[in-house]
Image (cartoon, coloured by chain):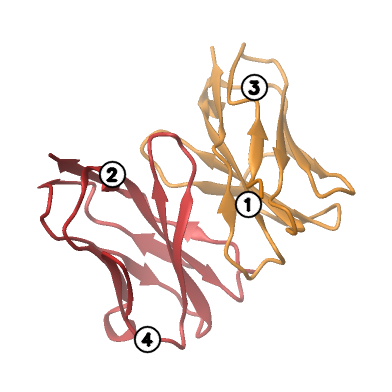
Amino acid sequence: AQKVTQAQTEISVVEKEDVTLDCVYETRDTTYYLFWYKQPPSGELVFLIRRNSFDEQNEISGRYSWNFQKSTSSFNFTITASQVVDSAVYFCALSEVRGSYIPTFGRGTSLIVHP
Amino acid sequence: DAGVTQSPTHLIKTRGQQVTLRCSPKSGHDTVSWYQQALGQGPQFIFQYYEEEERQRGNFPDRFSGHQFPNYSSELNVNALLLGDSALYLCASSYNRNTEAFFGQGTRLTVV
């Protein structure tokens, strides 16, 4: 069965610090997708990135970067030079082809960025 | 382009009552999924609708039912409400099931 673990429940940083959110996953499938979503206080889950299991290239989008390592079953998310607007709950999710692409979410990491 | 819209945004119901939540998918999307998110937890998959039929279902009792209309909009119905049904209910839409899903802002249901 698929499983996503986000061991960090809450992270508190001061603005301009870099912060990394960890995500470890378990799957028996060879074809799967990994996601990161941001949930601000408004409640809406905002899609950040989708990565398939055959693409281990790291990705950078502005201040955001993602490190996908199949060897350690991890898909970590780094925010560089954090800003107060980055404060939110961040969810990592996994969907398997054999699971009909239904995503399993981690419990989320609450990021608090202080001015 | 309107994203996923849900109504109502907040709802208070009494234990034992029934509730209907509504969702309009993002333009061009044909697949709608519903999730329950308890406080401090990640979203839990309830079910998914495609072509007006329930395609996948998570581990939720039959009290949870749904419907998808020809215009792809969807409803989630919960009967015989329990206190434990209090949660944020999220609707997500996608084009086919293997593309990224876009979420609405959710309906916060409180059962008293």
From the viewer's perspective, is A30 left or right of B75? left
Specify the amino acid type for callout 2.
Answer: Val
Lower sequence index among marks 3 and 1: 1
Give the residue pinned by disc 1: B58
Rendered residue at 40%/33% (across/down): B39
Q: Colour of chain A?
A: red
**What crowding class fits label 3: few (fewer than 14 Cα within 10 Å), some (14-19), or many (20 or more)?**
many
Give the residue pinned by disc 3: B81
Residues indicated by labels 4 and 1 sit on the same polypeptide chain = no
* Quadrant housing residue A115: top left
Give the residue pinned by disc 4: A56
Q: Is residue A29 above or below residue A109?
A: below
Q: Which mark is residue B45?
A: none
Q: Residue furthest front?
A: B1
**What crowding class fits label 4: few (fewer than 14 Cα within 10 Å), some (14-19), or many (20 or more)?**
some
Q: Position of residue A10 (x, y in %)?
A: 21, 45
**What crowding class fits label 2: few (fewer than 14 Cα within 10 Å), some (14-19), or many (20 or more)?**
few
